[in-house]
Image (cartoon, rainbow, N blue to C red):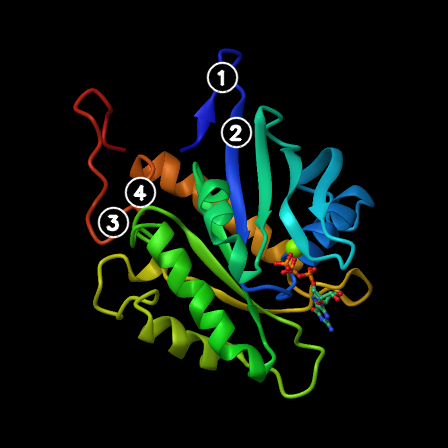
């Protein structure tokens, strides 16, 4: 749920979800650096530092959080979280998920991780009570494209289809299917990290403004209230 406080500030919660080691922390870290150093600083800027609660290995122990402020509409703040991907942290992920307005699912493109990716997606579906796409915009990163023989976009779309997270073309909400981005989360070699974040921010705004928090059904004409002249 997008939250608005008394002074009209808007808080949107975006969540990076995926199996252990898929690159969630790296993606948010790179997003922070790209927006801070101005490489992609057009639309948002980080406020404060990135909070990371991790083990010595670098694997997330609790969560990461970064806050980004819209530059054009300074009252809008994006609270960006990552979950801890290790299987044993499942109860914790459920808590971190609460109040999420949009999800970026991070696939690890290494072929020996396919099962882990699918298990993580199944867990997300369960936690989201099957409201992905309809109530919760979701985008997908197929991360680690710099490694040999990575999973590609169409292979991942097939997995999403099998898991029911990719609607058929005749479905009225088809246009809200997740876009699958082939990514590299490493800052030195970053690919599509900013793009996927910016698109999720855009989609959450559209769900809010046009669908009252749900995916707008664009197959029907939008009804204007009676006092609004039809232009
Ligand atoms: N080659 C390559 N390595 C990556 C990429 N993204 C992340 N990594 C590496 O993968 C490892 C795990 O990355 P993290 O960002 O910690 O993964 P995570 O998803 O946050 O993992 P958990 O916190 O355990 O859930 C680190 O060594 C990263 O440097 C990528 O695009 N390419
Ligand atoms: Mg992490």
- Which residue shows up at 42% across the image and 62% down it? 178
> Residue 132: x percent and y percent?
35, 54
Q: Earlier in the sequence, mark 1 or mark 3?
A: 1
Secondary structure, mark 4, is loop
Report the side of 12 relative to 31 (left or right): left
Q: Earlier in the sequence, mark 3 or mark 2?
A: 2
The alpha-carbon separation of the residues under discs 4 and 3 comes to 9 Å
The image quadrant that residue 225 belongs to is top left
Q: Earlier in the sequence, mark 1 or mark 2?
A: 1
Asked if the residue under mark 2 is in contact with the one under mark 1, i.e. CB atoms within 8 Å, the reply is: yes
Mark 4 lies within 8 Å of ligand 1 (Cβ measured): no
Q: Quadrant of the N terminus?
A: top left
> Residue 194: x percent and y percent?
65, 54
Depth check, front residue: 56 or 174: 56
Asked if the residue under mark 3 is in contact with the one under mark 1, i.e. CB atoms within 8 Å, the reply is: no
Residue 217 numbered tag: 3
The alpha-carbon separation of the residues under discs 1 and 2 comes to 8 Å
Most extreme residue toward the left is: 226
191 shown above or below 198? below
The alpha-carbon separation of the residues under discs 4 and 1 comes to 21 Å
- Dot 1 corresponds to which residue? 5
The alpha-carbon separation of the residues under discs 1 and 3 comes to 28 Å
The alpha-carbon separation of the residues under discs 3 and 2 comes to 24 Å
Q: Earlier in the sequence, mark 4 or mark 1?
A: 1
Q: Earlier in the sequence, mark 2 or mark 4?
A: 2
């Amino acid at each position: 749920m997008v939250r608005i406080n008394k002074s009209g500030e808007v808080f949107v919660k975006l969540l990076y979800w995926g199996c252990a080691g898929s690159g969630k922390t790296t993606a948010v870290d790179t997003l922070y650096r790209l927006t801070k150093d101005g490489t992609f600083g057009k639309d948002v800027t980080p406020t404060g530092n990135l909070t990371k609660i991790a083990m010595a290995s670098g694997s997330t122990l609790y969560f990461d959080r970064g806050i980004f402020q819209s530059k054009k509409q300074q009252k809008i703040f994006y609270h960006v979280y990552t979950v801890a991907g290790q299987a044993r942290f499942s109860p914790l992920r459920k808590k971190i998920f609460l109040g999420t307005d949009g999800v970026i699912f991070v696939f690890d493109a290494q072929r020996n991780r396919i099962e882990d990716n699918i298990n993580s997606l199944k867990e997300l579906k369960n936690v989201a009570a099957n409201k992905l796409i309809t109530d919760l915009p979701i985008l997908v990163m197929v991360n680690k494209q710099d490694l040999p023989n990575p999973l590609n976009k169409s292979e991942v779309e097939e997995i999403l289809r099998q898991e029911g997270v990719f609607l058929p073309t005749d479905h009225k909400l088809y246009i809200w299917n997740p876009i699958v981005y082939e990514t590299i989360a490493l800052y030195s070699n970053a690919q599509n990290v900013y793009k996927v974040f910016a698109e999720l921010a855009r989609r959450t705004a559209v769900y809010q403004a046009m669908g009252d928090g749900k995916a707008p059904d664009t197959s029907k004409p939008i009804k204007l209230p009676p006092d609004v002249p039809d232009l």
